[in-house]
Image (cartoon, grey):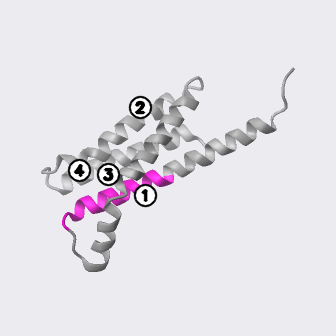
């Protein structure tokens, strides 16, 4: 799996989510841009990860940012569930955006984790040079 490319795709989705949220709230909520700002930071590490020399460090930082994105957006999930079942919530756009951010970030973090485990197994199975 090409994790630097996946990181760029994930960060692009976060940027798009932030922009859609911002324009969906008629440009009144600056906090709707949080996923976009977050995505820009992750994008930087995704681009850095294309260089073999920096890949491990950049991907570890990007994966931790993914975990933070999950944790940061998780508080919107109860409001989103309430919106689904009752059709009411205080800020529906925020609930939707936070839930999407949280779920996308969780998927990204889990894929990063799988990649790290696969890389560790691959290096453990590699014969040692003497």
The numbered mark at residue 83 is: none
Q: Nearer the viewer, mark 1 or mark 3?
A: 1
Image quarter in which the C terminus is found: top right
The numbered mark at residue 17 is: 3
Residue 42 % position (x, y):
41, 38
Residue at screen point 84% across, 28% down: 128
State whether residue 10 appears in this view: no
Q: Write down the region rendered in magenta.
A: 90-107
In this view, 74 is above or below 42: below
Residue 31 % position (x, y):
21, 48
In the image, taking residue 31 as reference, residue 84 lies left or right, namely: right
In the image, taking residue 105 as reference, residue 26 lies left or right, namely: left
In the image, taking residue 68 as reference, residue 111 lies left or right, namely: right
Q: Label 1 to label 3, Cα distance in Å?
A: 12 Å
Q: Label 1 to label 4, Cα distance in Å?
A: 16 Å
State whether residue 111 appears in this view: yes
Sequence-first tag of 1 and 4? 4
Sequence-first tag of 1 and 3? 3
Q: Which residue is mark 1?
A: 103
Q: Which residue is mark 4?
A: 32
């Amino acid at each position: 799996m090409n994790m630097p490319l996946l990181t760029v795709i994930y960060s692009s989705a976060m940027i798009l989510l932030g922009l859609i949220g911002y324009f969906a709230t008629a440009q009144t909520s600056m906090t709707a841009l949080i996923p976009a700002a977050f995505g820009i930071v992750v994008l930087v590490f995704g681009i850095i990860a294309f260089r073999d020399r920096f890949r491990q460090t950049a991907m570890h930082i990007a994966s931790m940012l993914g975990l933070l994105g999950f944790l940061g957006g998780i508080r919107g999930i109860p409001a989103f569930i309430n919106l689904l079942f009752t059709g009411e919530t205080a800020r529906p756009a925020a609930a939707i955006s936070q839930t999407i951010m949280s779920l996308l970030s969780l998927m990204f973090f889990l894929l990063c984790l799988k990649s790290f485990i696969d890389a560790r197994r691959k290096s453990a199975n590699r014969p040692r040079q003497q």
